[in-house]
């Protein structure tokens, strides 16, 4: 069939308004195929997946929900390529000069564009009040190794991520560094539109002690890196709500149903074409399974009566790089953000979790935080609380992006202790498609309660408490 952009596309399963096991398996086997090389964001394989998703939504009869009347929303990403080893020189008050060894003495985390190249004055920060209130791009702030504390101090003084300064240096006098990685292995991706943030440099051992004790007055940093733009896009489908006779205003309320379609590619430095062993991290459970279920939900809802609330089907890019596609959507929503009343996210639905009763049983992150979990249970759905709250799944999937915007957001999953997580063994043949089908039917009922307006998504008192451990 023709793809949404007019090119010949990958075959879809036979059209069927019902949620079927066969269609779920078809979607997963395509998404987790070796041809797609692990669906890494910013690759041609990722673009091929987004074309497939758009074609499926178009055939199902949804409306495009992306930019400019289309199915796609461009997500502005870039990667940083290391051209040579970064260098760092410390200039002491007594006039001595100390060249540090990358990896052993220091490491660099590039937050935005690799812009911190030059010589900077050094200021040691022992307390929040030592952080200058005014911007000073010629200054390197030396802070203790606790990232959480230093981040709080910077934000409190009006410099989130250290913006406004030249370099942020964290010192670890009692730590040893690691040997440097092979050049190019530390490629990162982030938002192009994010305000330029300084590099985060971590210094170890004796050089860290010199910095912390005020023996260093200047430092010279050369990153030897460049930024390369990455093409990427979310896929967005829309079903407009019609309200109800009693509550026509429900039509303006929006439920975002989401899943991420990317994964983590191939093993670093390996080539699937020439390597004798399996090097492709296919991501069948994570999250081809959730993506497949979301596709089936879109087709089922599109075939039925129009929902009371408007439904947005959001297929998120670049989750594995830090939920970047979802962050982009939340910052550039294709419907007004104030209209979104709930996000129900789907993640890892391909294998039963023995801690919640096995096949067909789901768990909901943050079950006790809002009206959703208890109401799902009262309606007879096989949905329980996350049995591993210590792992903080509530804040580790795309739902948390909406939560931080004040929107009720949860993830349905059966991820549990999948031994194939982020491994080359996360293949379609390892999934339990009967379990996945049962889960998809439960998710359809859960989403239906949100779509028809019978369930009002509200936070419980005191929520969302993001400082908690759940």
Image (cartoon, rainbow, N blue to C red):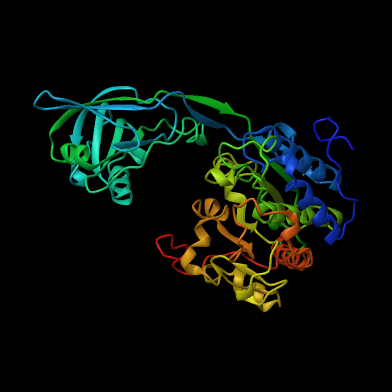
The quadrant where residue 331 appears: top right
- Say whether residue 19 is visible: no
The reply, left or right, for residue 275 in relation to residue 84 is right
Placement of 449 over or under 339, stated as above or below: below
Residue found at the far left of this picture:
94
Q: Position of residue 120 (x, y in %)?
A: 24, 25
Q: The N terminus lies in which quarter of the figure?
A: top right
Residue 72: image location, x then y, percent: 70, 36
As displayed, is residue 19 above or below residue 157?
below
User: Who is closer to the viewer here, 46 or 340?
Assistant: 46
Expressed as whole percent of the image width and height from the top left, the position of residue 325 reads 59, 42
Along the viewing direction, whichever of 258 and 339 lies nearer the viewer: 258
Quarter-of-image position of residue 172 = top left
**28 relative position to 420: left or right:** right
367 left or right, relative to 296: left
Identity of the residue drawn at 24% across and 35% down? 141
Identify the residue at image location x=74%, y=68%. Answer: 442
Foreground pick, 402 / 148: 148
Question: How many numbered badges does the structure rendering display?
Answer: 0
Q: Residue at 32%, 31% (x, y): give it.
A: 164
Camera-side residue: 2 or 181? 181
Question: Which residue extends farthest front?
Answer: 276
Left or right? Give the position of 63 relative to 205. right
Residue 439, how many percent across, how many down? 73, 66
Q: Quadrant of residue 122?
A: top left
Q: Is residue 136 visible?
A: yes
């Amino acid at each position: 069939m023709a793809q949404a952009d007019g090119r010949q596309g990958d075959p879809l399963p036979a059209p069927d308004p019902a949620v079927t096991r066969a269609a779920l398996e078809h979607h997963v086997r395509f998404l987790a195929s070796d041809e797609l090389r692990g669906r890494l964001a910013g690759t041609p394989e990722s673009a091929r997946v987004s074309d497939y998703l758009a074609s499926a939504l178009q055939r199902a009869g949804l409306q495009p929900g992306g930019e400019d009347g289309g199915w796609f929303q461009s997500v502005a990403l870039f990667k940083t390529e290391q051209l040579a080893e970064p260098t760092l020189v410390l200039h002491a008050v007594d006039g001595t000069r100390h060249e540090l060894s990358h990896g052993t003495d220091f490491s660099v985390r590039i937050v935005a564009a690799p812009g911190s190249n030059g010589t900077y004055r050094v200021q040691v920060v022992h307390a929040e009040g030592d952080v200058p209130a005014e911007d000073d791009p010629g200054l390197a702030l030396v802070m203790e190794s606790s990232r959480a504390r230093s981040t709080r101090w910077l934000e409190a003084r009006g410099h989130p991520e250290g913006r406004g300064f030249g370099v942020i240096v964290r010192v670890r006098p009692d730590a040893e560094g690691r040997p440097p990685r092979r050049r190019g292995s530390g490629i990162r991706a982030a938002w192009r539109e994010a305000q330029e943030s300084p590099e985060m440099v971590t210094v170890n051992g004796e050089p860290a002690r010199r910095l912390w004790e005020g023996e260093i007055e200047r430092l010279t940093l050369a990153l030897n890196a460049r930024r390369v733009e990455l093409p990427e896009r979310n896929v967005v489908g829309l079903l407009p709500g019609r309200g109800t006779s009693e509550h026509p205003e429900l039509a303006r309320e929006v439920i975002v149903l989401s899943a991420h379609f990317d994964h983590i590619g191939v093993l670093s430095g390996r080539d699937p074409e020439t390597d004798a062993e399996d090097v492709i991290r296919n991501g069948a459970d994570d999250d081809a399974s959730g993506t497949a279920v979301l596709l089936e939900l879109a087709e089922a809802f599109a075939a039925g009566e129009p929902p009371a609330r408007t439904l947005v089907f959001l297929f998120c890019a670049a989750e594995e790089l830090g939920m970047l596609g979802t962050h982009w959507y939340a910052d550039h929503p294709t419907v007004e953000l104030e209209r979104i009343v709930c996000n129900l996210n789907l993640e890892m639905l391909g294998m039963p979790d023995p801690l919640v009763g096995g096949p067909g049983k789901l768990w909901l992150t943050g079950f006790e935080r809002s009206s959703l979990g208890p109401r799902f249970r009262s309606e007879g759905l096989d949905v329980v609380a996350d049995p591993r709250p210590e792992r903080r799944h509530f804040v580790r999937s795309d739902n948390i992006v909406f939560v931080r915007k004040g929107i009720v957001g949860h993830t349905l999953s059966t991820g549990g202790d999948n031994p194939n997580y982020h491994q080359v063994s996360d293949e379609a043949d390892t999934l339990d498609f009967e379990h996945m089908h049962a889960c998809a039917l439960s998710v359809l009922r859960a989403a239906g309660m949100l779509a028809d307006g019978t369930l009002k998504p509200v936070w419980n008192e005191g929520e969302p408490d993001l400082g908690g451990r759940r």
